[in-house]
Amino acid sequence: MAAESFKSYLTGRKKTVDSALQKFLPTSRTRPSTIHEAMRYSLFAGGKRLRPILTLAACEACGGKMERAMPAAAAVECIHTYSLIHDDLPCMDDDDFRRGQPTSHTKYGEGIAVLAGDALLTIAFEILAQTKPAPKCRYSVADFVLDLADASGSRKLIGGQVLDLEGEGQDVQLSPTQLRYIHESKTAALLTSSVRLGGMAANATPMKLQALTDFGYSVGLAFQIIDDILDVTQSSEQLGKSAGKDVATDKSTYPAMFGLEKSRKEATRLTRKALKAVGVFGENGERLEQIAHYLLDRDY
Amino acid sequence: MAAESFKSYLTGRKKTVDSALQKFLPTSRTRPSTIHEAMRYSLFAGGKRLRPILTLAACEACGGKMERAMPAAAAVECIHTYSLIHDDLPCMDDDDFRRGQPTSHTKYGEGIAVLAGDALLTIAFEILAQTKPAPKCRYSVADFVLDLADASGSRKLIGGQVLDLEGEGQDVQLSPTQLRYIHESKTAALLTSSVRLGGMAANATPMKLQALTDFGYSVGLAFQIIDDILDVTQSSEQLGKSAGKDVATDKSTYPAMFGLEKSRKEATRLTRKALKAVGVFGENGERLEQIAHYLLDRDY
């Protein structure tokens, strides 16, 4: 019963996020139509909306109305989608399928795929700047932009992809510290910003914002470890993308470095840490807790 | 004498902008170093700094201290540089040289070039969000971000590149209206935002902001027409990039559509229009006028 209600919560939130994105994005008939079609193609390709759902849940955990966090929620999803489009390019991970559908460059060609990614990155900040903090909120629009730009920038999201790119196909194995750094920058940073922005929209106290930061970081790392595990244990059909790719490209991953069992234990440990961090929210933090459990136990 | 003093003004401003960029950009030793090296390689490849100089000049024309416009000036140059890196990619215009030096993908490979562009686009908003509008300024950081994101987004800067990409190598000639639209979106939009952001940093009245908008638009179109003319009349050595490329790729340009003489006349007419627009600033607008003249008469 509780599981059923969480499932319908996720479905409902996905719909809410989808309709916000529909509203923020130019229609596919806006000229030049190719670019707007391509932006929408990837944005509405069936993503789970994990990051924006976390943004809204973090806002509510801090006692805010989720509407205030809607621009931030839409913005993090645009950043996530742009990073997938560019990561899938032939000059990067060279993936033809994602979520069971042709990737952007497969469908539109490389030039348009690069530009669609650029456009989603740009519109993320345009949407985020439409945030209206409550009167006397301790965070300004500048704080929102700085937080997201930092998480998405050359030291974090982009930096992680650089290391990933440099590490692929190399004989030299990464050290555990280097692997942790890639996961932190490539996955945990944007997840952390997703919950932080939600908290900021609710005018979270510095103490609560710290709790969200700790939660996002631990959940983000656990999420990436589970992703690496699923790449080994699941079929391409189940994942909707090419499975077994990490091994094929000699990518350093948790399972490759520590084995499946130890990796799963580490994901469990991190999830427990995340749950502890949001204890400070009491009952208000229940959705965040459910999401952390769900991410650990997922099989796709 | 006046010419000499204008030349040293440009040199001085270029230095000012360069040291602001040095300060805003992570050092090339910041990890991961590859991406920061690549960002700096393109950013410090000898650009004229036209857009940031216009930002600072617009701020001063409106009676502001140029320091307030420095984040905006640095941000527009980061946007400009990112757009060059991505435009030069093999899947776009496929240019191996720019300003006499190997382009980013030639030097670092395509993957890093895509990411260096992404990183410069991202840091542009991070820098812009550091703008500190004067107390009681009618423009907030949100207004700055919205202006730049709009100019750089899928309807303008990126949209123009989409049309350019779609038009190349096609037998169908563009109409003059379509060509104008490409120039407006690909070149004039960012130039217009460059002067608008300068004005906004100086708390420009709506009337003065409109004058800057008109100025930026006309100067931007004139600038692009002159660029197309120089592609026909100058050698690659003089331009520091592949000359004659527009003809070779069957690109629609002003000279191709109207001939050199008519194109030059149109650039002159637009420059006159720009000069008229900044008449409202009186003596304070002198630098903007000089820049407009200089852009019309340049031979590189």
Image (spheres, coloured by chain):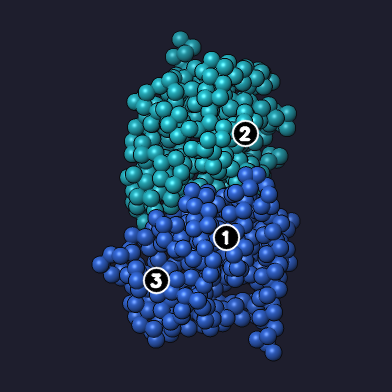
Chain colours: A blue, B cyan
Identify the residue under disc 3: A245
Q: Position of residue B26 (x, y in %)?
A: 41, 49
Q: Identify the residue at horizontal 59%, vertical 43% (top origin).
A: B159
* Towards the viewer: B287 or B265: B265
Q: Position of residue B251 (x, y in %)?
A: 50, 33
Residue type of the residue flagged with mark 1: Ser
Identify the residue under disc 2: B178
Quadrant the N terminus of chain A occupies: bottom right
Q: Residues within 10 Å of mark 1 (few under 14, many from 20)?
A: many
Is residue B35 visible to the viewer in this orientation of the structure?
no
Distance of label 1 from label 2 (alpha carbons): 27 Å
Identify the residue under disc 1: A42
Above or below, comparing residue B128 to residue A286 in the picture: above
Kindly indicate whether the residues beneath marks 1 and 2 are on one polypeptide chain. no
Find the residue positioned furthest to the front.
Answer: B171
Chain letter behind tag 2: B
Q: Position of residue B158 (x, y in %)?
A: 56, 43
Find the residue positioned furthest to the top.
Answer: B1
